[in-house]
Image (spheres, grey):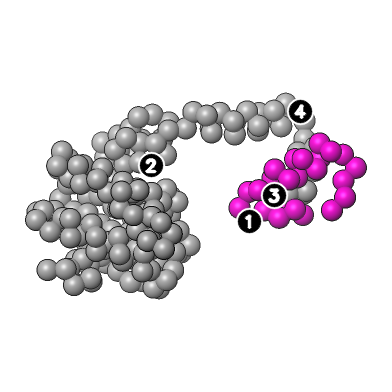
Amino acid sequence: MSFSSTLLEQAVNEFSKLPGIGKKTALRLVLHLVKRPKEEVSLFSETIAKMRSEIRFCSKCHNISDQEICNICNNPSRKKELVCVVETIRDVIAIESTQQFSGLYHVLGGVISPLDGVGPDQLTIDSLLNRLKTDEVEELIFALSPNIQGDTTLYYISKKLKESSVKITTISRGIAFGGELEYADEMTLARSIQNRQPVGSYIGVK
């Protein structure tokens, strides 16, 4: 792709680094910005820069937040005795979009995957275990993607909680094995949460 402007080329190259954005789409986005008023483009760039520099992670659930504690954890109407354990922040957004869950969350930051060099110490598992000691949690719902890595993580944490009195459940298999939670449609995801089942009957933990 040949450009008449070095500035245009540099902008296209930066946009094309975004997931799912190829050079043609990047060019279309950049040309759109070129046509917009300078003030509007400045606000766009300032908003992105401010988001990246000031965004934080909730000290309780590790979700994205503007403050030390996120809006979900701080919401008095949420059921604090119910905690949904998810892999990523995208999964929180997916579940929230169903409007069927009124508890809190815990973002692990990934799943155990030895082949990818990801072990338990690289996730927020210790934070979750400590949280159970201080918070009045009655049930943990594991909403991990139904694949080998998700099952491995579920099994590992379940063994850690073997002596705990906390009820441990997992979303039902309305989501196909090998699928990714964030790509499930809202109805399937909502039903999977509503029809959750005990972890013991799912992974054979006694």
Q: Earlier in the sequence, mark 2 or mark 3?
A: 3
- For the residues labelled 2 and 4, say whether their Cβ atoms are less than 8 Å apart: no
Q: Look at label 1 and name its amino acid.
A: Gly
Of mark 2 and mark 1, the one earlier in the sequence is 1
Q: Residue at x 72, y 26 (%)?
A: 39
- Give the residues in magenta: 1-25
Nearest-to-viewer mark from 2 and 4: 2
Residue 104 drawn at (x, y percent): 28, 45
Instruction: Pick whichever of labels 4 and 3 is earlier in the sequence.
Output: 3
Q: Mark 2: which amino acid? A: Asn
Going by the numbered disc 3, the residue's amino acid type is Ser
- Name the element at disc 1: loop
Residue wearing tag 1:
20
Using a 10 Å C-alpha cutoff, classify the residue at mark 2 as few (fewer than 14 neighbours), some (14 to 19) or many (20 or more).
many
User: Is label 2 in a helix, a strand or a loop?
Assistant: loop
Q: Which mark is residue 16?
A: 3
* Label at residue 38: 4
Q: Position of residue 20 (x, y in %)?
A: 63, 56
Q: CA distance from mark 4 to mark 3?
A: 22 Å
